[in-house]
Amino acid sequence: MKKSIISVLSVLTGAAAGAAAAGKLSADKRDEAKAYANKCIDLFQMMNKWVRVKQEGKNLSSYFEKEGYKKIAIYGMSYVGETLLEELKDTDIQVAYGIDQRAEDIYADLEVFSVDDDFDEVDAIVVTAITFFAEIEEKLADKVSCPVISLEDVIHEV
């Protein structure tokens, strides 16, 4: 009798611990999904504004020209970075290189460095990963002497 009570208590304790762990795991997954959804919303809103800028007949190169940035780097070479690179083709703005956490996995029309690499000086670094701008700006602050600017700010100022 005593053994069966201990067995039942062990099973219940294990089940309770498992349920608690599963509850925490699903809460963590929920938080992760919410952060990803917020990132997607932020990117959608920025890209929507960019489309409106294009519909007005403007090009982002005008911002860089106005600020005197002739040679830039793009931080974040996924979809948004590739789109920015394409927009600046055939303009007076030279994109010297890209920077990306996953540099070794990126295939682009220019050299892509990891944030830990050494890279040449440019007039500005444009961050396309707008959700993580503050963290990226902080990471780059000790590495470069040029301005680190958010693509979102560029789009809003064109």
Image (cartoon, rainbow, N blue to C red):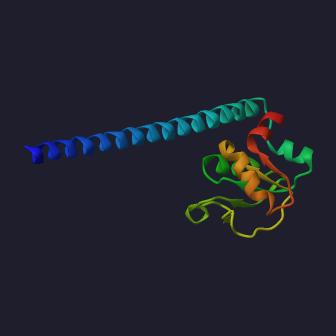
Which residue, as the protein is rendered here, is positioned at the far left? 1
* Residue 111 placement, left or right of 3: right
Which residue, as the protein is rendered here, is positioned at the far front? 2
The one of 9 and 47 positioned closer to us in this rendering: 9
* Residue 70 placement, left or right of 112: right
Q: Is residue 89 visible?
A: no
How far across and down, in percent of the image, does residue 68 sit?
92, 50
Which residue, as the protein is rendered here, is positioned at the far bottom? 118
The one of 81 and 138 positioned closer to us in this rendering: 138
Residue in view at x 69 percent, y 33 percent:
51
The N terminus, quarter of image: top left
Q: Is residue 71 visible?
A: yes
How far across and down, in percent of the image, does residue 93 sit?
83, 53
Count every numbered label the image shows and give the total.
0
The one of 70 and 26 positioned closer to us in this rendering: 26
* Residue 82 placement, left or right of 24: right
The one of 142 and 95 positioned closer to us in this rendering: 142
Instruction: Identify the image quadrant of residue 25.
Output: top left
How far across and down, in percent of the image, does residue 131 sit?
66, 42
